[in-house]
């Protein structure tokens, strides 16, 4: 994939939402640099969820950062944000310039292999700004990121690469679910940073 090759003004959804795909915004050396620092400097913890009334601890690790120590509830569990570190503020500034949006929080995910993913869901929690922007930055292994329309069941699949940026906004969370698809073929880790707009 060529650096800066994508048309960031194109809407990749056929209806009911907006998805902009920026492609690879960092070169290989830059992506390797950020990936290594994120592995070392982020306060990673195993993710937890309440599924069918059972408390599940996932292999995937997460971290939650924001402007203030606000609470965020997803998967029926409440988390409190950590203060930004220098690395995340640097990346946030770059993403804000690319998307022309402002973000006040970031949820990070660490997938150790392709067997770790996220099932179909919408980022529609009440704490999130309605129809706001969510910018997803990827480092590490390439993974398939899929959208599925709630009514038509139409699917759109992106393969997100090392240094890729994708943005969701508008009515996307109302009409579409998204997922990180699992695969046994990928044995190396991926980090995603999802910069968000919270109601604070």
Image: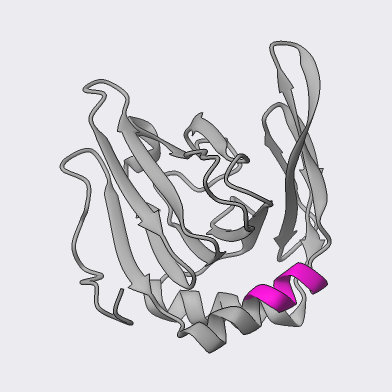
Q: Is residue 103 left or right of residue 6?
A: right
Residue 162 vertical position relative to residue 185 in the rendered view, above or below: below
Residue 100's image quarter? bottom left
Q: Residue furthest top?
A: 52
Q: Nearer the viewer, residue 23 or 113?
A: 113
- Quarter holding the N terminus is bottom left
As for residue 45 lying within the magenta part, the answer is no
Residue 85's image quarter? bottom right
Q: Residue furthest front?
A: 185
Residue 15 vertical position relative to residue 167 in the rendered view, above or below: above
Q: Nearer the viewer, residue 80 or 28?
A: 28
Q: Main secondary structure of the magenta part?
A: helix
Q: Nearer the viewer, residue 89 or 22?
A: 22
Give the residues in magenta.
35-40
Q: Nearer the viewer, residue 174 or 165?
A: 165
Q: Is residue 175 left or right of residue 163?
A: left
Residue 18 vertical position relative to residue 121 in the rendered view, above or below: below
Residue 73, position as x, y percentages in the image: 70, 36
What residue lies at 79% left-to-right and 15% top-to-bottom? 54
Q: Is residue 69 left or right of residue 97?
A: right
Q: Total marks drawn? A: 0
What residue lies at 42% left-to-right and 67% top-to-bottom? 165
Residue 39, position as x, y percentages in the image: 75, 68
């Amino acid at each position: 994939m060529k650096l800066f090759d994508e048309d960031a003004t194109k809407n990749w959804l056929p209806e009911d939402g907006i998805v902009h795909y920026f492609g690879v915004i960092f070169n290989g050396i830059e992506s390797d640099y950020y990936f290594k620092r994120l592995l070392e400097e982020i306060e990673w913890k195993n993710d937890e969820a309440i599924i069918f009334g059972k408390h599940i601890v996932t292999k995937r690790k997460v971290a939650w950062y924001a402007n203030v120590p606000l609470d965020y509830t997803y998967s029926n569990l409440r988390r409190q944000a950590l203060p930004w570190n220098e690395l995340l503020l640097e990346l946030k500034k770059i993403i804000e310039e690319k998307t022309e949006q402002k973000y006040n929080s970031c949820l990070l995910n660490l997938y150790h292999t392709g067997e770790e993913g996220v099932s179909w869901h919408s980022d529609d929690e009440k704490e999130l700004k309605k129809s706001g922007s969510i910018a997803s930055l990827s480092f590490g292994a390439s993974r398939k990121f899929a959208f599925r329309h709630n009514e038509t069941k139409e699917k759109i699949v992106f393969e997100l690469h090392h240094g890729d940026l994708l943005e969701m906004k508008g009515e996307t969370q109302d009409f579409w679910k998204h997922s990180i698809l699992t695969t046994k073929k990928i044995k190396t880790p991926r980090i995603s940073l999802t910069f968000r707009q919270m109601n604070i």
